Amino acid sequence: MAPLAPAPLRVLTLSSLFPSTAKPVFGLFVARQTQALAALPNTEVQVVAPMGLPPWPMSLAPQYRAMSKLAPVESWAGLKIWRPCFRHWPGSDGRFDVTALVKILTPLLEKIRQDFPFDVMDAQYFFPDGPAALALGKHFDVPVSIKARGADVHYWGHRPVPGRAIRKAGQAANGLLAVSAALKADMVQLGLPEDRIRVHYTGVDLTLFRPLDRAQAKAHLGIYGPFIASLGALIPRKQQALLLEALTALPDAQLAFIGDGPDQARLKALAQQLGVSGRVIWTGALPPADVALWLAAADVMALTSASEGLANAWVEALACGTPILITDVGGAREVLTDDKAGRIVPQDAKAIAAAISSLICDPPSQQLCRSYAARFTWANNAQALRDHLSALVRK
């Protein structure tokens, strides 16, 4: 007998993290997860990706002008994306974001619901998406799930106004998701109900992120000798300064920062001060195919963050057959269950340099590293998400 088809499910995904032509690599992991969910049988998904724009004249800055020119509704990789703008006040600590979101989204969701009577709301970031989704879920009488990804809990959860909103929303939401068991524990410590939190691991495209001939990949990029890649936004929380300090003890190595962010100028000045700027490459933000090439070329992918949920960069590097050097934060020990495919190190430059040196001198095989990423598939991720959301609708 053929298995019964799953009951129809209509999901409205709310995410302030979502790529666009203005920010093509912003929140790609949310987009990839949403695509995989929409590909499941009897599953329909539409996405509301709100954009916070500051008042004039700050809104005239190039990055905001590009965002304001985006179409209010479009098709993106087969998904219907609604892109409403709400007023965001820089420096306000997010104090007004939830109210502004609810105000702009209520009439929009009324319109969407006429043709797409969604069964559940799926908020993909805890602040401001989560509290706004909860208010909207009550208005439209549908269950709400909120996902925590890391910084939304570790940073916003400990800010006065956002923290109160996160706790209130988390205690009232029908279901909660965490990207790692470690983040779930942090959520419980924040006061969120443990029995409603499900661990929901990320996915990785194992076809795109795959091992290559490392020497050939290096030659293609114009790199020779030991090579370290660091994938992540250039922000203080990622602590890339530790890698620059470690590089002083690795005189033959080159280091590439894959990403951009507000900390770049400070990091470039530090590289100059430490005398390593000639061995540092700044790629900027790259599309996934280019990221995969840089990761496959690296002898080590190093990320020395002060906090994480479960970084996609860890899993993507392993899928490319590249060992990882990471700090003991978030779900680090859920990915690296031993030291065969990488190292978990203290947040200390000397320890980082020593661990990188050991991985370069005695590298694990590419296939061994890749085996640590094998369970993180988008198919598994999407099915787990659908099961979670369907359960909320049934209840």
Image (cartoon, rainbow, N blue to C red):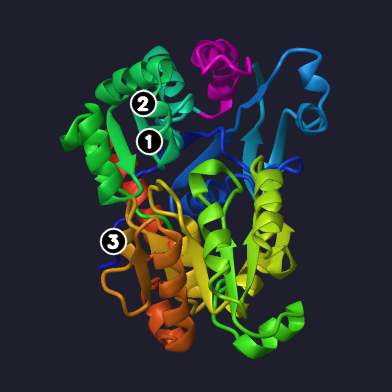
Give the prevailing secondary structure in the magenta stretch.
helix
Of residue 316 and residue 273, the one placed in the foreground of this image is: 273
Tell which residue pokes out farthest to the left in this image: 195
Q: Which mark is residue 154?
A: 1
**Image quadrant assignment for residue 250:** bottom right
Residue 328 to residue 49: above or below: below
Other-residue count near label 3 (Cα within 10 Å), few / some / many at <14 / 14–19 / ≥20: few
Mark 2: secondary structure = helix
Q: Residue at x 51, y 69 (%)?
A: 301
Residue 56 to residue 151: above or below: above
Pointer 3 residue? 334
Pointer 2 residue? 158
Q: Residue at x 33, y 21 (%)?
A: 169
Residue 297 to residue 337: above or below: below
| Mark 1 residue type | His
Q: Is residue 56 left or right of residue 86?
A: right
Q: Is mark 1 in CB contact (under 8 Å) with mark 3?
A: no
**Image quadrant assignment for residue 296:** bottom right
Of residue 15 and residue 78, the one placed in the foreground of this image is: 15
Quadrant (top left/top right/bottom left/bottom right) for the C terminus: top left
Mark 1: secondary structure = helix
**Where does residue 102 sit, x and y in percent of width and height?**
52, 14
Q: Is mark 1 in CB contact (under 8 Å) with mark 2?
A: yes
Dot 1 or dot 3: first in sequence order is 1
Dot 2 or dot 3: first in sequence order is 2
Instruction: Measure the C-alpha gap from mark 1 to mark 2.
Output: 7 Å
Is residue 141 something one can see in this rendering? no
Other-residue count near label 1 (Cα within 10 Å), few / some / many at <14 / 14–19 / ≥20: many
Q: Is residue 115 magenta?
A: yes
Residue range highlighted in magenta:
88-116
**Where does residue 4 sit, x and y in percent of width and height?**
29, 57
